[in-house]
Image (spheres, grey):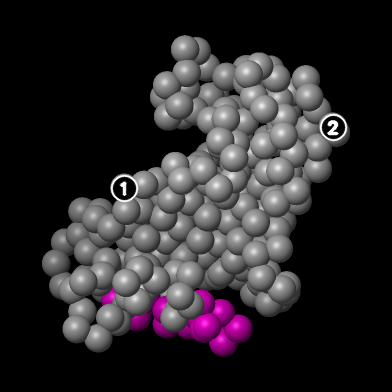
Amino acid sequence: MVETAVLHALPAPDQLRHRSRVLALLDCVLGGMAHAHPTRTYRYVEDWRPGESLASMDNGAGDEYSIVFSSAGVYVRGFDHHSELNTYGRSATGALWPGLTDGLPAPFHPYITDAAFRFDEEPTMTVCVWQLSTDSGWHASQTVHLDEEDLNGDGSDWLFDQLTDWSAEPKADHYRRYFDLPADPDHAALHAIMDGTPITVDLVYRLNPDIDLAIVTEEAAISGIPVGF
């Protein structure tokens, strides 16, 4: 059976939503990029569809995830293009890996074939995790197997690492390297925003003194994260 590493690492839905919003805001502030910028990695849209919010990650190298928050619960889809569970272009019927969505509750079934989570009309998924609003924890299929050793697993051990490792030091190192910053971002400012401190102009400028506040307020409006300016 393929181990879904993230199954026991994801925080509760409310905290997952908060962290997703923060990652989107940090992408905006530290990268100086508006929500629609094509090279954005993390996004969060509060009113994605009626009654649904969407958090997403796209690293530009073929790997991504999507997290749908709805009244039914939370649906998590991940795609590691190096995983053996990647069936894109390998299946004549465009089917997912056998068993990947076994046990998925009915309210989440439409997402399997949703055009938003497909490429060239084929589904792209190697990770499927969910939690109904009535559940007390995360779930995944227990029937996913490989015919041969898979060194990459399903990708869940790394796709969601920025959501599961929630401390300022590794975040500072990640953003310094990713945005090629001359030094680590202000750890205290990072920690404050990650901890849920109200977003102020001072906090934003401590992370990026050259940021255009207009794109930050736009980001806040899209993600639903409150800002004090």
- Residue at (51, 83) in percent of width and height: 109
Task: Name the residue tied to disc 2.
Answer: 229
- Residue 213, horizontal then vertical, whole percent: 72, 30
Is residue 36 shown above or below 68?
above
Q: Nearer the viewer, residue 48 or 84?
A: 48
* Element under disc 1: loop
Task: Name the residue tied to disc 1.
Answer: 61
- Residue 68, horizontal then vertical, whole percent: 59, 66
Quarter of the picture holding the N terminus: bottom left
Q: Is residue 135 visible?
A: no
What amino acid is found at the position of numbered circle 1 in the picture? Answer: Ala
Task: Write down the region rendered in magenta.
Answer: 97-111
- Residue at (56, 35) in percent of width and height: 33
What amino acid is found at the position of numbered circle 2 in the picture? Answer: Phe
Identify the mark at residue 225; answer none if there is no mark. none
Quarter of the picture holding the C terminus: top right
